[in-house]
Image (cartoon, helix red, strand yellow):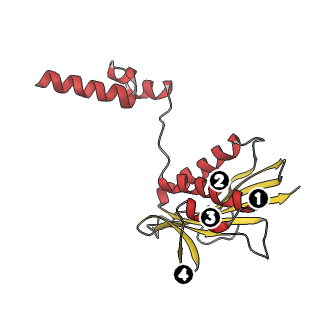
């Protein structure tokens, strides 16, 4: 029984931590050989899906209702909302007459998701053709209380000038909140 348990633990360690740890290497040596892959939290995945499945199609002339419904959004009090779970959600801010080339979303997510949201958007931006270049990343917003940071990327595409920006409320250790706000803005100015 003890031998089977040791074999099981070694197998799990080999799968989750890499073969170096299972073979007796120290964790610090194994960590330098391969970076840990951490799955994106649902808020980050849903934010990128909102960008790809709702904002960009609508900015290119697609129908809001069809795009939002297909992405899982539901109408609540006149607002398109995607529930992540509990009080975590994304509220869609579609283009309107005043801003026909801008689509946005307000993401309410756990404080631990803040970095993952910015990283997911950065990965999405760099994977586009042409890639969106970083304009600024993790720039502090002067005078904001609570503190906020902004990150943005842009590129000239065949469809026009494409820009994405993410403003993020930062956690305050003195006044912790269970949910922080992040604001996604997507703009597509036709060529």
* Disc nearer the start of the sequence (3/1): 1
3 vs 4, front mark: 3
Residue tagged 2? 52
Q: Tell me which corner region of the image, top left, top right, bottom left or bottom right, holds residue 79.
A: bottom right
Q: Residues within 10 Å of mark 2 (few under 14, many from 20)?
A: some
3 vs 2, front mark: 3
* Disc nearer the start of the sequence (3/2): 2
Residue tagged 4? 77
Residue, far right = 191
Say left or right for 176 vs 7: right
Residue 94 x %, y %: 68, 69
Residue 152 x %, y %: 72, 54
Residue tagged 1? 60
Residue tagged 3? 66
Q: Are marks 3 and 2 in contact (CB under 8 Å)?
A: no
Instruction: Please name the residue shown 82% across and 48% down the image.
Output: 157
Say left or right for 185 vs 11: right
Mark 2 → mark 4, Cα distance in angstroms: 24 Å
Mark 3 → mark 1, Cα distance in angstroms: 14 Å
Residue 31 x %, y %: 46, 29
Q: Residues within 10 Å of mark 1 (few under 14, many from 20)?
A: few
Instruction: Please name the residue shown 89% across and 55% down the image.
Output: 191
């Amino acid at each position: 029984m003890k031998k089977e348990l040791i074999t099981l633990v070694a197998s799990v360690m080999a799968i989750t931590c890499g073969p170096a740890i299972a073979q007796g290497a120290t964790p610090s040596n194994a960590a330098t050989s391969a970076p840990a892959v951490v799955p994106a939290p649902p808020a980050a995945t849903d934010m990128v899906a909102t960008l790809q499945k709702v904002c960009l199609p609508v900015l290119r002339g697609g129908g809001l209702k069809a795009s939002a419904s297909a992405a899982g959004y539901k109408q609540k009090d006149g607002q398109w909302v995607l529930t992540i779970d509990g009080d975590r959600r994304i509220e869609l801010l579609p283009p309107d007459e005043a801003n026909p080339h801008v689509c946005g979303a307000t993401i309410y997510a756990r404080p631990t998701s803040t970095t993952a949201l910015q990283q997911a958007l950065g990965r999405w931006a760099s994977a586009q053709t042409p890639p969106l270049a970083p304009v600024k990343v993790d720039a502090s917003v002067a005078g904001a209380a609570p503190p906020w940071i902004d990150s943005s990327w842009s590129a000239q595409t065949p469809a026009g000038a494409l820009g994405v920006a993410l403003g993020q409320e930062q956690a305050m250790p003195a006044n912790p909140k269970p949910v922080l706000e992040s604001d996604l803005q997507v703009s597509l100015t036709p060529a």
